[in-house]
Image (cartoon, rainbow, N blue to C red):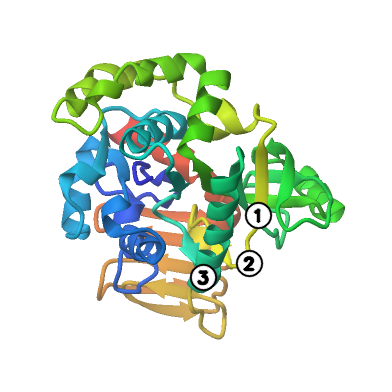
């Protein structure tokens, strides 16, 4: 899934050039390139579909030269995760009714890729043999209020039955979840057979199911794009969590054995980058820190930045826009972006 605009990474991530197409980690590869390479070790390249907005078609083809156009599912409108997942499942089912599919965001950070592969293979095997929907859970390390949480049944089994999902709780609730011990962060990485997920849509989201089922004869043909253009905008704007996972009794979770970060905010990026002796991070330019600590500075290459007496700040300059925001207000960058757009556009 590579269709989001990463608005909390504004002003670097924009609607024209969102974060999955940037090298935010300074590794020499963009986030979508790193994700594609990671999945290639599990799934043949030709079996990887990229779901993205139609405006990013050229960006995807430019950054992933091994991909051909029929591997792209181009959304003419933003409709969250449920519609694009159902459309993909129907396309895959037409090609292979016995297929098992992995759904992964294009912009996450995963440290131990070998452990990731091992976890996915366990999930593949379980979904090949059982009518279940699986997600990967991440052991929480602190009461993060920006993530969704998965409550699971306490049992000795390696694969846990999911009891409920909770979206972005407040700090007090997140702290309670950690103390109870049977909650995981929701990584948004899913595995299921096409049969299981499609029948789940039929049961729990019938309007969405019928909308896309009507196009089955067109999928994987030259007429597919016309059907999508005519019908995609009619789809409900809804996440896979709300449409299916919160309603289905067949959801199971595998606790992940790899380190994970959703790279959803500047603060989460800060956690993963090398810091100086005062815990400052510089990306792009050159920064002189004077009595300043715990800051992240992202600027254009070779720009000189001087910080004096600043602590716990996000400073981002993309050449056209400069933002200076306290780190504890990072969740508000999305709203700040909207206010700025309204005032100056």
Looking at the image, do the residues carrying marks 1 and 3 touch, with CB atoms under 8 Å apart? Answer: no
Residue at the image point whose x is 49% and y is 54% from the top: 265
- Residue named by callout 3: 272
**Residue 73: percent from the left, percent from the top?**
27, 38
- Under circle 3, the secondary element is helix
Residue at the image point whose x is 42% and y is 43% from the top: 99
Question: Callout 1 environment at 10 Å: few (<14), some (14 to 19), or many (20+)?
Answer: many
**Residue 22: percent from the left, percent from the top?**
30, 59
Residue at the image point whose x is 75% and y is 44% from the top: 151
Q: Is 88 placed left or right of 120 in the picture?
A: left
Q: Is 307 placed left or right of 44 in the picture?
A: right
Quadrant, the N terminus: top left
The Cα–Cα distance between marks 1 and 3, rounded to whole angstroms, is 24 Å
- Under circle 2, the secondary element is loop
**Residue 250: percent from the left, percent from the top?**
66, 35
Residue at the image point whose x is 30% and y is 46% from the top: 50
- Residue named by callout 2: 257
Question: Callout 3 environment at 10 Å: few (<14), some (14 to 19), or many (20+)?
Answer: some
**Residue 82: percent from the left, percent from the top?**
46, 31
Q: Is residue 247 above or below residue 72?
A: above
The Cα–Cα distance between marks 2 and 1, rounded to whole angstroms, is 9 Å
Q: Is 74 placed left or right of 152 in the picture?
A: left
- Residue named by callout 1: 254
Q: Is residue 129 above or below residue 121?
A: above
Q: Looking at this view, is 18 or 227 the one in front? A: 227
Looking at the image, do the residues carrying marks 2 and 1 touch, with CB atoms under 8 Å apart? Answer: no
Q: Give the image quarter of residue 138.
A: bottom right
Q: Earlier in the sequence, mark 1 or mark 3?
A: 1
| Residue 12 showing in the rendered view | no
Residue 312 is tagged as none
Q: Looking at this view, is 266 or 238 the one in front? A: 238
- Choose mark 1 or mark 3, whichever is in front: 1
């Amino acid at each position: 899934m590579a269709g989001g605009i990463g608005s909390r990474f504004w002003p670097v991530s924009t609607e024209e050039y969102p974060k999955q197409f940037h090298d935010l980690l300074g590794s020499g590869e963009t986030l979508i390139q790193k994700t594609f390479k990671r999945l290639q070790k599990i799934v043949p390249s030709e079996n990887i579909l990229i779901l993205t907005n139609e405006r990013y078609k050229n960006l995807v083809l430019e950054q992933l030269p091994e991909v051909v156009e029929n591997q792209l599912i181009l959304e003419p409108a933003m409709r969250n995760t449920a519609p694009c997942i159902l459309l993909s499942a129907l396309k895959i089912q037409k090609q292979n009714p016995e297929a098992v599919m992995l759904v992964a965001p294009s912009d996450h950070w995963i440290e131990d890729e070998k452990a990731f592969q091992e976890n996915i293979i366990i999930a593949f095997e379980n979904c090949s043999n059982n009518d279940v929907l699986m997600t990967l859970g991440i052991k929480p390390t602190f009461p993060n209020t920006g993530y969704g949480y998965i409550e699971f049944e306490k049992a000795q089994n390696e694969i846990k039955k999911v009891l409920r999902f909770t979206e972005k709780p407040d700090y007090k609730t997140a702290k309670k979840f950690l103390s109870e011990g049977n909650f995981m962060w929701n990584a948004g990485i899913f595995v299921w057979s096409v049969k299981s997920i499609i029948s789940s849509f039929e049961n729990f989201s019938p309007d969405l199911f019928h909308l896309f089922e009507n196009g089955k004869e067109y999928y994987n043909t030259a007429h597919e794009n016309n059907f999508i253009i005519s019908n995609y905008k009619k789809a409900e704007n809804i996440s896979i969590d709300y449409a299916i996972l919160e309603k289905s009794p067949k959801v199971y979770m595998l606790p992940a054995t790899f380190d994970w970060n959703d790279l959803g905010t500047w603060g989460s990026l800060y956690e993963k980058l090398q810091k100086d002796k005062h815990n400052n991070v510089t990306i792009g330019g050159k920064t002189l820190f004077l009595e300043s600590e715990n800051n992240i500075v992202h600027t254009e290459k070779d720009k000189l930045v001087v910080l004096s007496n600043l602590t716990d700040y996000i400073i981002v300059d993309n050449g056209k826009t400069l933002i200076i925001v306290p780190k504890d207000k990072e969740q508000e960058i999305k709203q700040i972006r909207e206010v700025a757009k309204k005032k100056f556009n």
